[in-house]
Amino acid sequence: MKEKEELKKEESTTTSSVVSFNEATDHYQKIMGLPNQRADLKSMPKALRWFSYFFYAVIILGALLFLVSWFIHR
């Protein structure tokens, strides 16, 4: 019980950490080596940042074009 409380305190101090919501996901994160922190785009190299911005823009524009074409053909 104390271990869980200590883990929650540690997780609450790091705001950008990915919180595991049960023991199975916590085990999976430890065994499979999933990152426990989200990626910070500002700390990445410039080329990688621009690629991620381009990637997000393509996804958003694709979704918008899909919605527009869906409403036109409706």
Image (cartoon, helix red, strand yellow):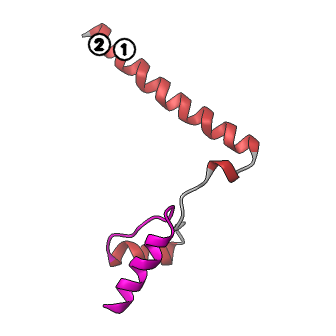
Name the residue at 49% across, 72% down. 13
- What segment is highlighted magenta in the picture? 1-22
* In the image, residue 20 lies in the stretch drawn in magenta: yes
Checking the image for residue 31, the label placed there is none
Q: Mark 2 sits on what residue?
A: 71
Q: Is residue 14 left or right of residue 74?
A: right
Q: Secondary structure at mark 2?
A: helix
Up the image or down, 20 lies above or below 74; here it is: below
Residue 4 position, x and y percent, is: 35, 84
Residue 33 position, x and y percent, is: 54, 72
Residue 2 position, x and y percent, is: 35, 91
Q: Quadrant of the C terminus?
A: top left
Q: Are marks 1 and 2 in contact (CB under 8 Å)?
A: yes
Q: Secondary structure at mark 1?
A: helix
Name the residue at 50% across, 72% down. 32
Q: Quadrant of residue 55?
A: top right
Q: Quadrant of the N terminus?
A: bottom left
Q: What amino acid type is highlighted by mark number 2?
A: Phe
Up the image or down, 56 lies above or below 10; here it is: above
Name of the residue lying farthest toward the right: 46
Q: Quadrant of residue 50?
A: top right
Checking the image for residue 68, the label placed there is 1
Q: Quadrant of residue 66?
A: top left
Q: Give the Cα separation between the discs numbered 1 and 2.
A: 5 Å
